[in-house]
């Protein structure tokens, strides 16, 4: 149980101010720091992550504590980009494979 530093009144656990005199108890700053940061729209960071996956990954790692929403958008953008590139390579490989199989067969008759 905490006591007010100003008047000595007993203060409820987790209370920000003394009920007797209104002095801040020290719980207030910790609570204020936990307020989520206003991050606005994070769509742009997702687009950035998509076009520059490496930057998206770096931003994801830098921001994951301070700006969770921006971090997630940048990370998702980078992830989607990587998946798209991998899918494109698989598609190209499949096409090359089909051509490699089909062209000699066509030439041979
Ligand atoms: Zn007090």
Image (spheres, helix red, strand yellow):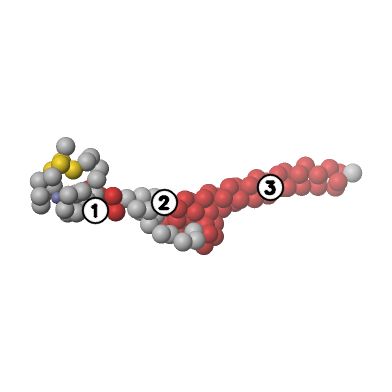
Q: In this view, does 102 lie above or below 49?
A: above
Query: Which residue position is annotated with label 1?
Result: 29
Choose between 83 and 2: the one closer to the eye: 2
Q: Is residue 73 above or below residue 44?
A: above
Counting from the top left corner in percent of width and height, residue 62 is at 37, 54
3D distance between C-alphas at marks 1 and 2? 21 Å
Disc nearest the viewer among 2 and 3:
2
Q: Residue at x 32, y 50 (%)?
A: 34
Q: In this view, does 3 lie above or below 69?
A: above
Q: Quadrant of the C terminus?
A: top right
Mark 3 CB within 8 Å of ligand 1: no
Q: Element under label 3?
A: helix
Query: Which residue position is annotated with label 3?
Result: 91
Q: Which of marks 2 and 1 precedes in the sequence?
A: 1
Give residue 68's mark. 2
**Mark 2 touching mark 3, by CB under 8 A?**
no
Give residue 87's mark. none
Q: Quadrant of the N terminus?
A: top left
Q: Which of marks 1 and 3 precedes in the sequence?
A: 1
* Left or right, residue 54 beside residue 91: left
**Res. 52 in view:** no
Counting from the top left corner in percent of width and height, residue 99 is at 76, 47
């Amino acid at each position: 149980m905490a006591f007010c530093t100003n008047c000595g009144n007993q203060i409820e656990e987790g209370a920000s101010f003394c009920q007797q005199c209104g002095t801040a108890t020290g719980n207030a700053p910790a609570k204020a720091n936990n307020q989520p940061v206003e991050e606005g729209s994070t769509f742009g960071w997702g687009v950035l992550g998509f076009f520059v996956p490496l930057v998206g990954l770096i931003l994801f790692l830098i921001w994951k504590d301070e700006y969770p929403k921006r971090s997630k958008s940048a990370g998702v953008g980078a992830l989607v980009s990587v998946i798209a590139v991998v899918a494109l390579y698989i598609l190209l490989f499949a096409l090359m494979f089909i051509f490699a199989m089909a062209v000699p067969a066509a030439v041979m008759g």
